[in-house]
Image (spheres, grey):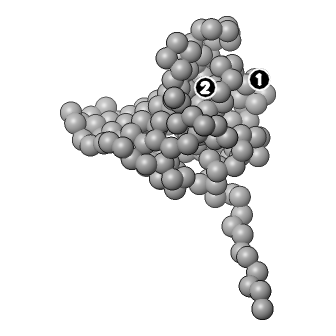
Amino acid sequence: MRVPRIRRPLTHISTLFLLPASAHAQVAPESPIHTTVNGAFYLCPRLIGTEAAPPTEELSKLGFEATAPLVPGRGLWFKGDGGKGNLTVSYDPAEKRCTLDYVGAGYEQIAGIARDMVEQNRFVRITGGDRDGAKGDVFEGAARGQTKIARFIIIENYTDGSAAISYSER
C-alpha cells in the first residue's frame, strides 16, 4: 500500500526562497516581517540578477516603492512599510550588493526571520559573533538557478535597535 504524500501549503514563508524567482514566490506584504522577506529574498536577488528595478506595480506587490527616479547604472533606493520602524532597501550596482535596513521595534524578529530562512534553505554559516553591541552572521549557499554563490550577511545591532540584511553573489 502506498502512503500518500502530505504537502504543506505554500503559505509558509520558508518556502519562499526554494521556489523559482516568480510572482508566486513572494508573500503578501501584511507586516514588516513579510516586507522584509520580500525585500531580502525576492527583490535583492532580482536586483543583483537583472541590475534593474522591477516595475512600480510589482514593487508595490512586494510592499515597496522607489524613492527616486530609476536611472540605469545608479544606485537604487526603495522604501517599504516598516510598521513602527523604518524599512529601506538599497542596491549599489558598483559593488553588486543589495542591503535591507530596518530601524525600530521588532529589529530582533527581522534579523531572526532572515537567519531562520537562510538556515532552512541550506545556507552554511561561515562566520559570526558578537562585537561592539552587534551580532553578525555570514551565510553562503547556491544562488537560485545559477552556478554562483549567494552570500547573506545579517547584522542585529542592539545598541541602536536596527537590523541589516545584505545580499550579494559571486
Q: Pinpoint residue 46: horizontal percent, then vertical percent.
A: 66, 30
Q: Pinpoint residue 170: horizontal percent, then vertical percent.
A: 51, 29
Q: Pinpoint residue 70: horizontal percent, then vertical percent.
A: 68, 11
Residue highlighted by disc 2: 48
Dot 2: within a 10 Å radius of its alpha carbon, few (fewer than 14), some, or many (20 or more) residues?
many
Q: Which amino acid lies under the numbered mark 2 shown in the image of this protein?
A: Ile
Residue at point 77%, 23% (across, down): 55
Residue highlighted by disc 1: 55
The answer to whether 116 is drawn above or below residue 151 in the figure is below
The answer to which image quadrant residue 65 occupies is: top right
The answer to whether 99 is drawn above or below residue 38 in the figure is above
The answer to whether 47 is drawn above or below residue 146 in the figure is above
Residue at point 46%, 41% (across, down): 140
Dot 2 falls on a residue whose secondary structure is: helix
Q: Is residue 161 found left or right of 36 in the rendered image? A: left
Q: Which amino acid lies under the numbered mark 1 shown in the image of this protein?
A: Pro
Q: Nearer the viewer, residue 113 or 83?
A: 113
Q: Is residue 1 found left or right of 91 in the rendered image? A: right
Q: Is residue 66 found left or right of 102 in the rendered image? A: right
Residue at point 28%, 37% (across, down): 134
The answer to which image quadrant residue 131 occupies is: top left
Dot 1 falls on a residue whose secondary structure is: loop
Q: Earlier in the sequence, mark 2 or mark 1?
A: 2
Dot 1: within a 10 Å radius of its alpha carbon, few (fewer than 14), some, or many (20 or more) residues?
few
